[in-house]
Image: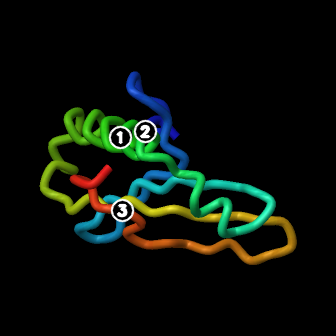
Amino acid sequence: GRWRRTPVGEIDIVARRGQILAIIEVKARRDRDTALEAVSSRQRRRLRRAAEWIIAGRADLAALDIRFDVIAVAPWRLPIHVIGAWRPDNG
């Protein structure tokens, strides 16, 4: 949607449930472990900057708790959703 692309980076999925704004990175690799390891510290910083950009433009989102998740996708396996894959101040 309109939030996915920001001047500081792209976010795969932005979702809100209650007081949580989830920034979700989707990684597809040959196996789920490789997919889970594919989010580098540089990418985490980029996602944090993109989330901050989104929040700065939306006063209604500023009070929400932000959470960073990863969805790992591999052929012939169910996706794994890692909730709170890293902390916003640890990226």
Mark 3 and mark 1 in contact? Answer it, CB < 8 Å.
no
Q: Residue at x 19, y 59 (%)?
A: 64
Q: Position of residue 19 (x, y in %)?
A: 23, 68
Which residue is identified by label 1? 45
Total marks in image: 3
Categorize mark 3 by other alpha carbons within 10 Å: few (<14), some (14-19), many (20+).
some
Which residue is identified by label 2? 42
Q: Which of the two residues, 69 or 64, is positioned nearer the viewer here? A: 69
Q: Secondary structure at mark 2?
A: helix
**Label whose residue precedes the other's in the sequence (3 or 1):** 1
**Label whose residue precedes the other's in the sequence (3 or 2):** 2
User: From what the image shows, is residue 15 above or below residue 3?
Assistant: below
Which residue is identified by label 3? 86
**In the picture provided, is 6 more to the left or to the right than 37?**
left
Categorize mark 1 by other alpha carbons within 10 Å: few (<14), some (14-19), many (20+).
some
Q: Residue at x 43, y 72 (%)?
A: 83
